[in-house]
Amino acid sequence: MINNIIILGLIEVVISLITGFLLFFFCFKLFFVFTKKIDNSEQLNNNNAAMAILLIGFILGVMIIVRSAVSSAMDNLGLLLKQENPQFIIIVNIIIRIFLSYIFAGIFSFIIIWLSFLFFTIITTNIDELEEIKKSNSATALVLSTFMISAALPAQTPVTAILNSIVAAPAHIQSAMGGSLINGKLMVEGLLELPIWLLAVVFVFIIGYKIVPLLTKDIDEDAEIKNNNIAVALLVSSFIFGIMILINAALDPSYALIRTIINAKTITFALVAFSLLRIISFFIGAGVLALIMLVAALFFFMFLTRKINEQEELKKNNIAIGLVTALFVIVLALLMEHSISVLLSGFTLSGGSSTGLPVSM
């Protein structure tokens, strides 16, 4: 048993190192493709911190998705090594599947991060992000990087489901060489969860970037970010990340409804329509609760710090005030996440329901 654990650890270290270096290399190259309007090498050589921040956000977003997606493959490798006499050919087969898992994870993560990057740059019509980054506008890079990382976090579940359906190691040793490569049920589950992820990203942008900043009516966020105001960028980034944490609470019950539909003996239009309405209501409910809680918390924070005029200090690019306020928003969101998740889960269909009607508690 101890030897198997050591072997598993060594294999995982080797695979992680190899794929980590390869993914980092490809991230670096693909980032240059995505930002082809900019000579990235020249900008980095010229000490353009904004370019470095954006590159870090891009790579970190990709790695977040890849890391979560391969854990199940490693678990299956561990189950294999627990066998008394595993055949060499089966071990090789599963290692190949694990490498394929990293490859597919990389592909999906690149697509997801690129879509979030594209979505943000298209919707924010008041700011030309790439032009601002060429000017070494670190504030713009910080907000954009935070959005990409925030978009990566809820994408972990659907990507994991899709990867498990394609390259998951077989559950039984006997089927390692002859089992089906694609699990149709898991594939459908993952593909149906991707639109929910997209809905979460849209809600985060609308609430975190468009609605919450309305509370700071004395600050023109777009203008301040274009002026490279790091303090305001920290505040906006904390709104985006905090809202993503809270909207993320709506994902688990939404995914549970997707699984309810897939596992239902009879899939009816009423079941699908009712489930979709519930999913939308989860996001609206989470968004409203998040907005109310953050508004109340911010006003309470400003009340407690009456000696400091936060908005005026933020306009003066007071980074200290920006850091403290941003930390307060994120910590509060982390504390509230579980309560919102429990509240929304109470309205989820039970696993045995196939009618699409509300279940009494």
Image (tube, rainbow, N blue to C red):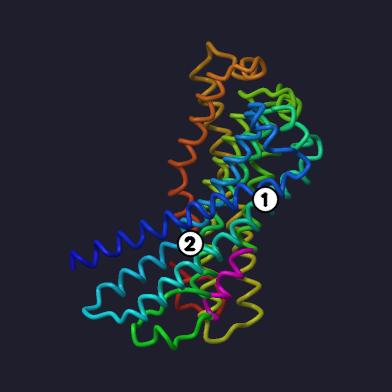
Vertical arrangement, residue 34 with respect to residue 105, above or below? above
Please give the residue where the numbered disc 2 appears in the rendered image. Answer: 69
**Dot label at residue 242:** none
Residues at circles 2 and 1 in contact by the CB criterion of under 8 Å: no
Name the residue nearer the viewer: 1 or 203.
1
Magenta residues, as a range? Answer: 184-194
> Label 1 amino acid?
Ser
Please name the amino acid that badge 2 sits on. Answer: Ala
Residue 58, picture quadrant: top right
Tell which of 137 and 307 is nearer to you: 137
Between 135 and 187, the one lying in front of the other is 135
Task: Tell me if mark 2 has few (under 14), some (14-19) or many (20+) residues whose alpha carbon lies within 10 angstroms of its own.
Answer: many
Q: Position of residue 34 (x, y in %)?
A: 71, 48
Element under label 1?
helix
Vertical order, 252 against 128 (above or below): below
Q: Quadrant of residue 16?
A: bottom left
Q: Helix, strand, or loop for circle 2?
A: helix
At horizontal 69% and vertical 32% (from top left) the residue drawn is 43
- The relative height of residue 15 versus residue 163 in the rendered view (above or below) is above
Kindly report the distance in space between the C-alpha atoms of the residues bearing marks 2 and 1: 19 Å
Q: Residue at x 60, y 35 (%)?
A: 53
Image location (x, y in percent) of residue 320: 53, 18
Q: Is residue 288 left or right of residue 127?
A: left
User: Where does the image place residue 216, in percent across and percent down from the top left?
Assistant: 67, 26
The residue beneath circle 1 is: 116
At 51% from the left and 75% from the top, the residue drawn is: 165
Q: Is residue 132 above or below residue 8?
A: above
Residue count near mark 1 (Cα–Cα under 10 Å), binned few <14, some 14–19, many ≥20: many
Q: Which badge, 2 or 1, comes first in the chain's sequence?
A: 2
